[in-house]
Amino acid sequence: MSDMRTLGEFIVEKQHEYPTASGELSSLLSSIRLAAKIVHREINKAGLVDITGGFGSENVQGEQQQKLDVYANEKFKAAMAARDQVCGVGSEEEDDVVIFDEAHGLNAKYVILMDPLDGSSNIDVNVSVGTIFSIYRRISPLGQPANLDDFLQPGNKQVAAGYIIYGSSTMLVYTTGNGVHGFTYDPSIGVFCLSHENMRIPEEGTIYSINEGNYIKFPQGVKKYLKYCQENEPEDNRPYTSRYIGSLVSDFHRNMLKGGIYLYPSTAAYPSGKLRLLYECNPMSFIMEQAGGKASDGKQRILDIKPTELHQRVPYFVGSTHMVDKVEAFLRDSPDQE
Ligand code: AHG
Ligand code: MN
Ligand code: MN
């Protein structure tokens, strides 16, 4: 008999490790799994849109074709709304939080924050994209609509976080605070299979990922760190390697498997960094710490930042612990004049 474990089986198995668990979080993860399959299907036929009808045109059912990020947003939102565990959703694609204030939403325990399609500019060129999600227990009382404070909790309050990478294969990677586990999708049977149990990032890595086009306005410490990577050879006769896909999920996933650092510091266009604290940095930081790595804004732990706004941005340094320590040290030693 095969010892293959599916995501569904794994979730049920893990639920038994928490004697007080009521199964609601498991059910919520199942809705995410379903939405992931739907988005996988759509992304895998994205190239066909041009020959079967472009975005903005009508498809065969007479429906308007949507951009994939809008499509992913709708699918994940609908999956959340269909279950009884979610009282509201915050999304990179929505200006404001979406509160589920009908009967089951009022008594639901969890809020979700998500980036439904990360790296969306890569879609047109057939390069990997992702979805990122983050789950919190609400702090407002049950029986009433959720409010903004439920969404503005620091990342250290997350109960689960994960991402889906739609790459050369589709994978779902998640944590509930007990290690990081990865599942690869087998489209022929429509099932996510456990392929990466207990993922760990090497403490030291050799890959750095940054959009170097923004170099001129980088903080001094980041410039020095890049120079350090270019002048040193962590392995004999082999310098650090630069790799940048331009979708956080993909760069992060590669670096977590191989060892490396992803950097998005402040730039001319984005003085506070480009990435969003609630939809991108918090969930990825929770995963990274659970995999044994580190996530920082250059000075402090990402997960300890108290958010003040839904769409808040933050400088971001995430990856192998020693590499993040190093860039923090350069930033400390070479402060920029304000
Ligand atoms: P999104 O597609 O959700 O807007 O996110 C894109 C983000 C992130 O995924 C990526 O690493 C980064 O923006 C790339 O930014 P640059 O093109 O400025 O390098
Ligand atoms: Mn994104
Ligand atoms: Mn996005």
Image: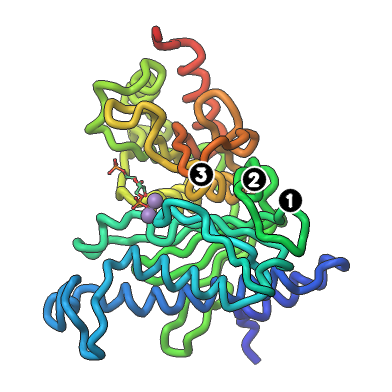
Mark 2, secondary structure of its residue = helix
Q: Which residue is mark 3?
A: 310
Disc 2 target residue:
149
Graded by Cα atoms within 10 Å as few (under 14), some (14 to 19) or many (20 or more), the crowding at tag 2 reads some
* 219 in relation to 311, above or below: above
Residue drawn at x 69%, y 72% is 26
Q: State whether residue 204 appears in this view.
A: yes
Q: Are marks 2 and 1 in contact (CB under 8 Å)?
A: yes
Mark 2–mark 3 distance (CA, rounded to whole Å)? 10 Å
SS state under label 1 = loop
**Residue at (36% x, 40% y) in the render:** 209
Residue 139: give its label.
1
Distance between the alpha carbons at the discs numbered 2 and 1: 8 Å
> Counting residues from the N terminus, which is met first, the one under dot 2 or under dot 3?
2
Q: Position of residue 271 (x, y in %)?
A: 36, 26
Residue 98 in the image: x percent, y percent?
52, 60
Of labels 2 and 1, earlier in sequence is: 1
Q: Which quadrant of the view contains residue 226?
A: top left
Image quarter of residue 110: bottom right
Q: Position of residue 221 (x, y in %)?
A: 41, 18
Measuring 65% from the left and 50% from the top, which residue is drawn there? 150
- Give how far apart the Cα atoms at labels 1 and 3 are: 16 Å
Which residue is pictured at 58% across the width and 55% down the height?
134
Position of 305 relative to 219 (above/below): below
Q: Quadrant of the C terminus?
A: top left
Tell me if I can see residue 319 in this picture: no
Does residue 128 sit above or below 304 in this rendering? Answer: below
